[in-house]
Image: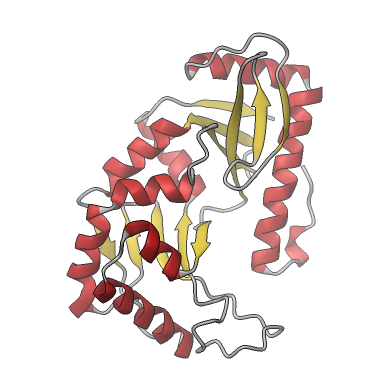
Amino acid sequence: MAEGYEYMVKGQKEARIGLDSEEDIIRMINFNEKFRNLLKECLITLGFNPKERIIARKDGVKTDILIRINEQEEIGVSIKSSTKTSFHQLDRRRLEEWKTFLNMPDEIFEIIKEAILRIARNSRNKFILEKNQDKIRNFLAKHLREIINEIFRKGEQKLKLFMINDKRKRRIYIFHMDDVLNFLFKNANNNISFTEKGIIRLGNFMTIQRKGGDGKHITIPKTDWRHPGNQLQFKFSPLKFAEYIELTKAIKFCTIDY
């Protein structure tokens, strides 16, 4: 696995770790017989039917790689790679997109927009104020399954596997995506809360906040709604999730050490 991430800035580092991990996993599937055979055993455990020699290649948006498991079937894989147990970006987009997708009422849109701009003015400000937290919680609770499906799968029906690469332990955790989504929904259902800074917590493994990343190369003021930092960002803690599942066996999973 590639090293040398310590000299990179935070966002650049996470992106490079992710890209390197995808390339490494493709290479191991295609050229490492031991790894390939262990993965085939795992696929059978998770309910798939791999026949011939499996082959991996790069793909689209939420799907990081595709694995051909037989002549008729190719399955998508979302890969989250990390060197620490912190939260990592899962999804970011303009609030207007969420307004359309969720048919968001104007009142909820304005509360979240004001929260994003409040953080843009001063990062020490509170994101969702106490007076608005019940309204935000109730809205998110009504749309929880839609939101979770969208941020993990975004309509990509081939996306059936979820991999977490723990680069500290050199261990890959493999899950059926449907199991992950169902677990996260149950974990967040009746478990939407707010941190002291007003950041939204969806259960124990996901958060919602202003994207940030106000780079000096961007000339638009960060208090301008058009600024790319003024997006809604969903974050996820892959290693915390993997360790919890490994401990509790809450859903079916496999591990491969490399």
Residue 253 as seen in the image, left or right of residue 103: right
How did the renderer colour the structure? Answer: secondary structure
Instruction: Judge whether 186 appears above or below 48 on screen.
Output: below
Instruction: Judge whether 231 appears above or below 236 on screen.
Output: below
Whole-percent x, y for residue 2 in the image:
79, 47
Tell me which corner region of the image, top left, top right, bottom left or bottom right, holds residue 194: bottom left
Tell me which corner region of the image, top left, top right, bottom left or bottom right, holds residue 178: top left
In the image, what residue occupies the spot 37% across and 28% down? Answer: 249
In the image, what residue occupies the spot 39% across and 31% down? Answer: 179
Residue 231 as seen in the image, left or right of residue 105: right
In the image, what residue occupies the spot 66% across and 36% down? Answer: 65
Whole-percent x, y for residue 152 in the image:
47, 46
In front: 187, or 161? 161
Whole-percent x, y for residue 172 in the image:
60, 34
In front: 35, or 44? 44
Residue 12 as seen in the image, left or right of residue 146: right
Exactly how many numbered labels are in the figure? 0
In the image, what residue occupies the spot 37% across and 65% down? Answer: 99
Instruction: Judge whether 109 appears above or below 161 on screen.
Output: below
Instruction: Judge whether 160 appears above or below 134 on screen.
Output: above
Farthest residue, direction top: 51
Check the picture and name the quadrant holding the N terminus. top right
Check the picture and name the quadrant holding the C terminus. top right
Whole-percent x, y for residue 241 in the image:
44, 44
